[in-house]
Image (spheres, rainbow, N blue to C red):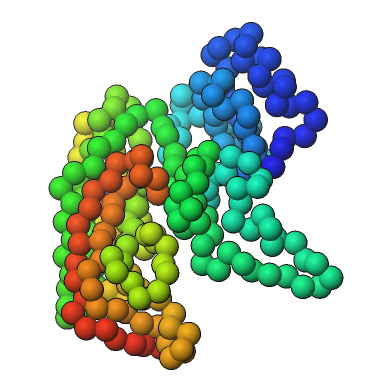
Amino acid sequence: MSLPGHLDAMISRVTRANNNTAVILQAGTPVAMPWIDEVPAVVWAWYGGNEAGYAIADVVFGDVNPSAKTCLSFPKILEDNPTYLSFKSERGRTLYGEDVYVGYRYYESVKREVLFPFGHGLSYTTFSFSDLEVVRNMDLGRIKVSVAVENTGSVAGAEVVQVYVSQRNPSIGRPKKELKGFTKLYLQPGDKETGIVEVETKYATSFWDEERNEWVSEEGTYDVLVSNTSAASGQILSASFDIAKTTWWKGL
């Protein structure tokens, strides 16, 4: 995860010489950032192809308001990865010891702090969430989540409404929460719109029952957590719904 050569040292020295330095990183996977507390801004550019330079310039000079979110969690160091002890093959044998605990599911379960959480992403404006409503349609077997999103900043931008579901008392070990849906809203300064995410109830609640070889949706209470990031430090609104009876199912 380390940047090659003397790049870390160069970033630190440049930042000390000019405290208005912004670091632009082009990489396809997380990298260690030992200088993160020294720099005022980091732009994660991924791999943008032939037009990447123009796109980065538009963001840096303010012609475009960045609105992306991280599609994975950024660990602080390589050893923090859930697959650190089992990511390689030994004499043709590979172990997937992390099970379902990958990404934010792992870091939250072991209470390990990350550099940037899954779903994180800042922009040149700010947003607020309010008026969460969760409605379960029994006839359609769906859950409708709606939340009001307001652009509270001074420039137009986009925000992502992320919907997570958490089972309160599962019969097995499960991640603390799981992403079940999301939607993106583009808002002018001061505008307020309702973000709506719908998901089938069975997909929102079920896990694979290995003994019965079927999916199972257990009776009980499920919490719906709506935020702009997977981290607890983000804006979080919560509601809940109940499943009255345990059911098993196969297929789609």
Taking the spot 77% from the left edge, 73% from the top edge, the residue there is 93
Left or right of 150: which side holds 215?
right
Instruction: Point out the residue furthest to the top here.
Output: 17
Q: Residue at x 69, y 62 (%)?
A: 86
Please provide percent x and percent y for residue 232. 35, 44
Q: Is residue 131 above or below residue 58?
A: below
Compared with residue 18, is residue 217 higher up or lower down, i.e. above or below?
below
Q: Quadrant of residue 240?
A: bottom left
Q: Is 82 or 47 nearer to us in this picture?
A: 82
Q: Which residue lies at the image location 15% right of the left edge and 48% below the top edge?
A: 131
Q: Is 59 displayed left or right of 160 in the figure?
A: right
Is 106 above or below relative to 152? below
On the image, the x and y values in percent for residue 236 come to 28, 46
Residue 51: percent from left, percent from top: 63, 38
**Residue 57 appears in the figure:** no
Query: Would residue 162 be visible to someone looking at this image?
Result: yes
Can you tell which quarter of the image residue 137 is in?
bottom left
Q: Residue at x 62, y 11 (%)?
A: 16
Q: Residue furthest bottom?
A: 212
Q: Is residue 213 above or below residue 201?
A: below
Residue 145, quarter of the rendered image: bottom left
Residue 121 % position (x, y) = 44, 39
Name the outermost residue toward the right: 91
Q: Nearer the viewer, residue 91 or 188?
A: 91
In the picture provided, is 94 more to the left or to the right than 96? right
